[in-house]
Amino acid sequence: LFRIQVLGFEVDSINSVQFSNHTGYAHWKGQVLTADELHVLYEGIKLNNVNHYDYVLTGYTRDTSFLEMVVDIVKELKRENPKLVYGDDRFCVFLQYVPENLYPVYKNKVVPVADIITPNQFEAELLTGKNISTEKDAVEVMDLLHKMGPDTVVITSSDLPSRLGDRFLVALGSQRSVKPDGTRTTQRIRMEIPKVDAVFVGTGDLFAAMLLAWTHHHPNDLKTACEKTVSVMHHVIQRTISYAYEMAGPGRRPSPAQLELRMVQSKADIEDPAIVVEATVL
């Protein structure tokens, strides 16, 4: 919420879960919002005639009925505002954490109404049925995903070899847009991103929020939007790593609490990130 508010967005948030802490800890307690409860909350918004949004960003869920309710709400919001942009960050987690019965819902219901998706390579392959072995394969997979609905596709990580060596991973992106004269154009990019030897919770949410925000500020410039998104990620993660190891002490592994992303401390970097990773236009 904070990370997107500081970039100028007024945000209404609905918690799909209300947990004591994120699930990277050994223990957590709390409640999971049901589809019916989500519907009740949305009905309250409608009754007050404040269901007019420019963007919708959703996170991960394990429940088919909840996911289908989200899709129904997004469709209704798009009828209210056909220019509404829907971004979904679930793809960065759904293979590892989401039950197999949800795969068809994502493929057949979520992707067709999404405008921005951020799958990793394996998820992109699963959604399209096509393997990625080369950069050309990746471009073809992104084109297939475009045909399924989204105008912006970013494959956040891949197994493709980096030109900078094995300490970097390759991300690729593709954005369709319409020029003022009505012709369609597609911008495709490639990024070599430094690998980080640590595990964090919340980086997928951060990436999706930043990509949505920076594509708003740079609507027809995926290169700049991705450079700013990845650079924010870099600054937040580096600040978090420095803090975590300082707090843990020499030779000790940081705890989940110490590895909480340093969001507030990174406010200036979120607002105006120094570019540390540049994209290549393909």
Image (tube, rainbow, N blue to C red):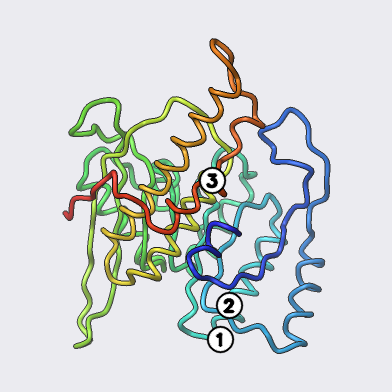
- In the rendered structure, are the residues bearing label 2 and label 3 in contact, judged by CB atoms less than 8 Å apart? no
- The residue at which mark 2 appears reads as 75
**Which residue does the image show at 68% across and 49% down from the upper left?**
62
Depth order, front residue of 45/236: 236
Quadrant that contains the N terminus: bottom right
In the rendered image, residue 109, in percent from the top left (x then y), is placed at 55, 65
| The C terminus, quarter of image | bottom left
Residue on which disc 1 sits? 79
Q: CA distance from mark 3 to mark 1?
A: 39 Å
Tell me the residue at 60%/84% (across/down). 52
Marks 2 and 1 in Cβ contact (< 8 Å): yes
Residue at screen point 50% across, 58% down: 209
Which amino acid does the dot numbered 1 rest on?
Arg
Query: SS for tag 2?
Result: helix
> Which quadrant would residue 214 be assigned to in this image?
bottom left
Label 3: element kind: helix
Give the Cα separation between the discs numbered 2 and 3.
37 Å
Nearer the observer, disc 2 or disc 3?
Answer: 3
Mark 2–mark 1 distance (CA, rounded to whole Å): 6 Å
* Amino acid type indicated by mark 3: Gln
Tell me the tag on residue 5.
none
Q: Amino acid at mark 2?
A: Lys
Instruction: Say left or right for 34 vs 5.
Output: right
Residue to which mark 3 is pinned? 265
